[in-house]
Amino acid sequence: EKLRESHHIIDDFLEYRELQKLLSNYIDKIPHMIAKDGRLHTHFIQTGAATGRMASQNPGLQNIPIRTERGRNIRNAFVAPKGSVLVALDYSQIELRIAAFLSEDEQLIQIFKDGGDIHRAVAAEMFHVSPDEVDSEMRRRAKVINFGILYGMGVNALKVQLEVDRKEAQEYLNTYFETFMGLARYLEMTKAYAHKHGFTKTLFGRKRHFEAIHSSLPHLRAMAERMAINAPIQGTQADIIKIAMVKIDDYLKKEKLDRNVLMILQVHDELVFEMKEKIADKVTKQIAEIMEGIVSEKETKGVKLKVDAKKGRSWGEMN
């Protein structure tokens, strides 16, 4: 990627790599994994990731691409049976929402309470303009910084992501933390807590340990610090969706819907269902309410969890 502008052949290499990955990982492999019932059965691993997220393998259905048109075409192969539709419900910007209420950053909390576009609102704060004056490049930069901060991104990584020099990247970081001082304090406190105790905790008390946080090797220590910053945020998200899955399952059994509504896939902050078409709208609304109510507004400091729903005949064609 860094060499892309150096020579026109780099584009061909990258395109070849994309095609080769789609071919070897999905097109060549998946048809041979279809079971006798005509379905594809993945294996979920509860302890698949250190943050608490579930992983999926044989095949890894959580990694089916979506960013490119070719990747989305792979998703078109996953279709609902006749009389049914596929419904995807996903938590909107959940990690940023979690960061807002865990850090108790008043400005970030207020942005979510006001609704609207979080990246546009953050760009307005950072670039000292009104939300209406935020252009696409300002929003893109705010988005990169928003998510980068959650993953402990430093100035060098930010420089590469934003395609700016080190001085400008540092200025962006400084401005961000001056604007969202509550979040800055929280991240430093999380890092200090990890150094003192060797672990961090999610909202629900689940721990993740970091042996390398006391390493004498600076790069290992820095990597552990980045993971320690992200673990309570991504870990809380993983806890929330697992609790949601249990509550949704209880709801479907209680309402005797478990034969007409199947929870078929979890992709980190998204749940995919197969539902009978005639009840899809009503059930989707109920499931969204369950997902949005996993954490009380008292615990989230008034930041609402927001769920977006899409449905379609195939996984690739949803709106």
Image: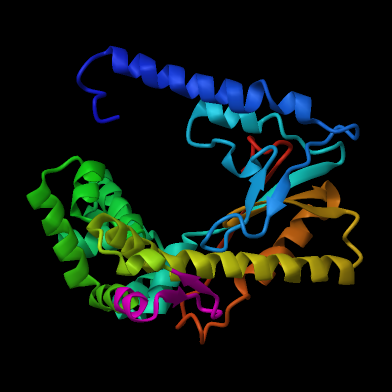
Is residue 104 visible to us here?
Answer: yes
Residue 182 inside the magenta-drawn segment: no
- Residue 7: x and y in percent read 23, 15
Looking at the rendered image, the quarter that the C terminus falls into is top right
Left or right? Give the position of 286 relative to 188.
right
Judging depth in this view, the residue of 195 and 260 nearest the camera is: 195
Indicate the quadrant where residue 223 lies. bottom left
Is residue 130 visible to us here?
Answer: no
Judging depth in this view, the residue of 203 and 87 nearest the camera is: 203
Left or right? Give the position of 194 relative to 155.
right
Judging depth in this view, the residue of 199 and 97 nearest the camera is: 199
Image point 27% across, 75% down: which residue? Answer: 188
Outermost residue toward the bottom in this view? 298
Image point 34% across, 80% down: which residue? Answer: 193
- Residue 142: x and y in percent read 27, 54
Note whether 157 is above or below 20 in the view shown. Answer: below
Left or right? Give the position of 194 relative to 263.
left
Residue 197 inside the magenta-drawn segment: yes
Query: How many tags in the picture?
Result: 0
- Residue 276: x and y in percent read 85, 49
Display colour scheme = rainbow
Image point 64% across, 35% down: which residue? Answer: 317
Image point 36% across, 58% down: which residue? Answer: 151
Looking at the rendered image, the quarter that the N terminus falls into is top left
- Residue range corresponding to the magenta coloring: 191-209
Note whether 303 is above or below 119 in the view shown. Answer: below
Outermost residue toward the left in this view? 167
Note whether 25 is above or below 181 in the view shown. Answer: above
